[in-house]
Amino acid sequence: MRCTVIGAGKSGIAAAQLAQALGYKVFVTESAPAERYPALEYLRQSGIEFECGGHTLERALEADLIVSSPGIPPSAPILHAARNANIELIGELEFSSRFAHAPIIAITGTNGKTTTTALTAHILRSGGYDAIACGNNGLPLSQVIAEDLANRPSRRVYVVEASSYQLSQTVQFHPVVAAILNITPDHLAYHGSMDNYVQAKWKIFQNQTPNDVLILCADDPRAAEASHYAQSRIEWFGLHPVAAGMYANTTESSIVLVSSNTEVKLMRYTDLPVRGIHNVYNSMAAALAARAMEVTNENIRDSLLSFTGVEHRLEHVRFVGGIEYINDSKATNVNATWYALQAFEQPIVLLLGGQADNNDYSVLDDLVRQQCRCIVCFGQEAQHIFDHFCTSVRCYRTDTLEEAVTIAHSVAYPGDIVLLSPACKSFDEFINFEHRGSVFKEAVYRLPG
């Protein structure tokens, strides 16, 4: 059996690793130059054939199965050629999930996926599961499955962060618990339209049965429609009472569990170590996923109280001269930045910029006027951001993130927060949002004081 893997990023390398472990003769094809992919050394050491700098269609189509990395756009000529050749074409998530020997919990949404995935795994571990957070968070499911083939851990649960890119390429993907946190416009250039983006997200529950659980946000206007198409049992979360699931009682600042027509106060959400109302949502979704796996309320409560967040998501970096620096590089869209601004009461020096994706900055207007001392615009989108906000708040414009940190340091006052929450993709200046966040932190650590 022959398998071609398209793309030599993390997901592609992991898919090649799994395919080889399953006995396939593997070929990896990548359009970008080899110097961008240091992980290619793994392919050399493993005896896996590969090419970079372009796709040789004749060689790539000599396959019984083609596995596409999630970043390959649907319109790519090589995918079109594969479809015309009637070769089975699936994504890395679909491929790896077919060989999972343990339950899959899948979490998607425009924002909050990484935090909720990490938090769900954290709660499950407290309940005695060998849970591993993987998927779109940087640890591909293929890599985990390949490593588990030789030694299957007991009580394993795969908690998978699933992006719209990954879900759009699924066919049989079947999580026993699925969660859709929220859906707002994002990745429209990739998907072609908002409807296509929504349909990709909804594929997370397309193969669920009445024995499975689907967790939906009652405050998301698209959730009610999704529930009509789902065959699974629905658990809801939101800021108002729900029929089944959890809600935040804002009068008492508590998280309330609703089950069998009874309500149980789980905890005060003001005690959560992670900041912001969006993390109340994330905590409820993670708690419902853990309850679906029969983790006790006590373990859920203790785990929520001990979870301190994930890197690059409202991450405290350093205090310098009474100014707190926060790394929210994972805010790659406007909605994520809106949630970040809501998490703070102090005056904010906001760092915005990067590569746009049909960004509508008007969503931030009210919060910027209320909370931002000024905005430092950087990167490819700097001029557009400057033009939008310069009449309502003081703005500075620069080319690079490091220069933006220097400017922010010079204009912030003690008691302020300097917040990197870019509202943009990172690909104009950086490899990914992690790279951007690391550069920000390095720049902050170099500040005097």
Image (cartoon, grey):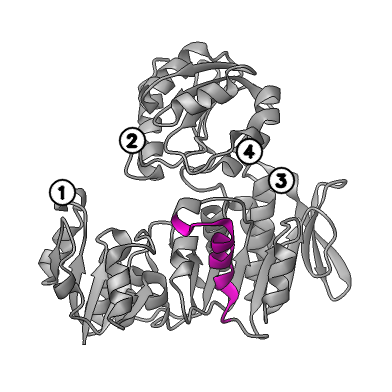
Name above or below for residue 431 compared with residue 65.
Answer: above
Tell me the CA gap for discs 1 and 4. Answer: 37 Å
Nearer the N terminus, badge 1 or badge 2? Answer: 1
Name above or below for residue 351 compared with residue 60.
Answer: above
Nearer the N terminus, badge 4 or badge 3? Answer: 3
Label 4: few (<14), some (14–19) or many (≥20) C-alpha neighbours in 10 Å: many
Q: Give the residue type that dot 2 points to.
A: Glu
Look at mark 3 in the image and give the residue it sits on.
Answer: 271
Span highlighted in magenta in the image: 190-207
Residue 26 falls in which quadrant of the image?
A: bottom left
Asked whether residue 125 is in view, the answer is: no
- Horizontal relation, residue 146 to residue 307: left or right: left
Q: Label 4: state its secondary structure.
A: helix
Q: Is residue 201 part of the magenta span, yes or no?
A: yes
- Horizontal relation, residue 431 to residue 313: left or right: left
Single out the mark in the foreground, 1 or 3.
1
Which residue sits at x=54%, y=63%?
196
Find out whether the residues at labels 1 and 4 contact each other: C-beta distance under 8 Å: no
Q: Give the residue type that dot 1 points to.
A: Glu
Look at mark 1 in the image and give the residue it sits on.
Answer: 35
Look at mark 2 in the image and give the residue it sits on.
Answer: 429
Q: Give the residue type that dot 4 points to.
A: Trp
